[in-house]
Image: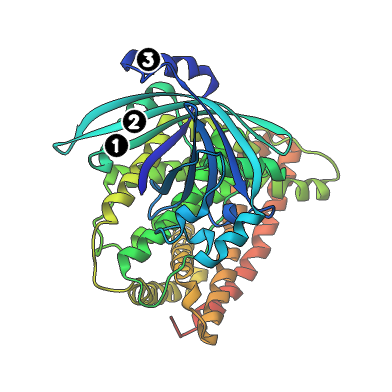
Amino acid sequence: MFEQEVRFQVPDAVRASVRAEIERIGAVGAGTRLLARYYDTEDALLGRRGAALRLRLEAGEWVQTFKAVGDDPLTRIEYNTPAADAELDLAALAGRPGTGALGDVDGLAALRESLGVLFETEFVRLRTVLRLSADGEVGSVELALDEGQIRAGGQVVPISELEFELLGGDVASLLQAAIPWVERFGLVLLPVSKSERAHRLRNGDPPYPVTTARTPDIATDTLLVAGWARVFDDCFEQISRNALALAAGQGDPQGGHVHQLRVGIRRLRSLEKLVAGLLPAPDPSLSEALRSLFRELGHLRDGDVLGGELLPRIEAAWGGPLSLGSAVAGGEAAAGLCAGTATQRLLLALLARRIDSGRHRVEVTLAGHARRRINRWLRRSRRQAAGFATLSIGQRHGLRKRIKRIRYGISFIESLLTGKRERRLLRSLKRVQQRLGDWGDLQTALARVAPLAPDDAGAAFAQGWLAASLQAMEKLLRAEMRRFAGLRHGL
């Protein structure tokens, strides 16, 4: 059985308003109290495999539920079985599609012996059903407001979630139904399940850690759309989870969430460039929204880099603290940006893009196509690298973006690159990207500090320090570019 749903965090300030709106539409009943016990091994075997197993008391009846990840960010595998004696029945799951996290049939008995209750959830669910049409098709969506708590490891955290689940019709109905609620109540996309939150609570981990890129599972014969979907899902996870952390005010003070959110956007844009001409292009409004968010986050990150990385080194050379005012303003503004309606609508638009484009079929492999396109990008980049000393600042920034696109494009098929020449190319690209990144950070920091220098001795010193560092970096960068231009092989 599959379910398609999208879940949002409900800000405390609007919980009563959301509840009242559901009641106005026509709540199903007065609210159902649900108590759930989640089972796993001590080392969280199921959780590490993206699965959850629970017994939940629903209207006086115990129900066993197994959940696992589906084929896209909106889909979950779910099996519900009556559990009259409030006991697990793993045999009821034996051989069912999508239950691989439990192991094979022979291992179920052994697994059952190692399972115990690791955490609980208790909340009141208020439900209603919406009916609407999308592209001429009538659909129905269930809304469920959950208010309660997660209990794990002696700790308690609140639950305040609004879930939209597709009951009938096209998945477009699901996303369309959510948009007015996001705009009216300031909901924040919640790509984290209750069980995942509970595991972190039990382990004493941060609720929303920095999410970085993973190496996608791409085989040589993976067709383009299937490979695109796997990479897209990983990019979306990196974007949505870091955005959630920032929107919740849980962002890393050193800018880790902001940086990784931008990396996720850059990877996604690189992916779209990689498949351009083979898949339908993203809607122009979606592309512009991504660029806009990336630019705004870049301004915040620039302040974090100057204040968190460069300023301590400048102060050490100066011999005391410096105040650079607005030049170091950074990530503290990211919460409002990520919780804002524009960003939340963008995330829903990305989900719609994923579902729509994932239905296409292109009879070429991702790896074969990626190699051809990346080699073309490489040839152009090497020509520019050979004449790096003569490039304008704008041309250098353009080369920097192209190098990143190549690096991210290669990362999508990195698991297939085993030859020595390929690994050498990859190492060279990483070095070039790092040098260009450091050079770009110094350029940006210098531009932020320079307006302050005429009126502030400390800022004038910082300007000089940055200019000298930039000059030293120029020599290193030119040498790295000569080495890169000299590598004649590709993928």
| Labels 1 and 2 touching (C-beta < 8 A) | yes
Q: What is the distance, in whole Å, between disc 1 and disc 3 at their CAs? A: 20 Å
Categorize mark 1 by other alpha carbons within 10 Å: few (<14), some (14-19), many (20+): some
Q: Secondary structure at mark 1?
A: strand
Q: What is the distance, in whole Å, between disc 3 and disc 2 at their CAs? A: 13 Å
Q: Secondary structure at mark 2?
A: strand
Name the residue beneath numbered marker 2.
142
Which mark sits nearer the N-terminus, 1 or 2? Answer: 2
Point out residue 206 in the picture as x, y percentages from the top left corner.
67, 42
Q: Is residue 462 visible?
A: yes
Q: 471 or 332: which is nearer to us?
A: 332
Which mark sits nearer the N-terminus, 3 or 2? Answer: 3
Residue 311, compared with residue 388, is above or below; it is above
Query: Image point 39% across, 59% down: which residue?
Result: 97
Q: Is residue 330 visible?
A: no
Point out residue 47 in the picture as x, y percentages from the top left corner.
58, 52
Which amino acid, mark 3? Answer: Glu
Categorize mark 2 by other alpha carbons within 10 Å: few (<14), some (14-19), many (20+): some
Which amino acid, mark 2? Answer: Glu
Query: Image point 34% across, 61% down: which residue?
Result: 273
Name the residue beneath numbered marker 3.
23
Residue 432 location, quadrant: bottom right
Marker count (numbered): 3
Q: 46 or 267: which is nearer to us?
A: 46
Horizontal side of residue 322 vs 303, given as left or right: right
Q: What is the distance, in whole Å, between disc 1 and disc 2 at their CAs? A: 7 Å
Residue 253 location, quadrant: top right
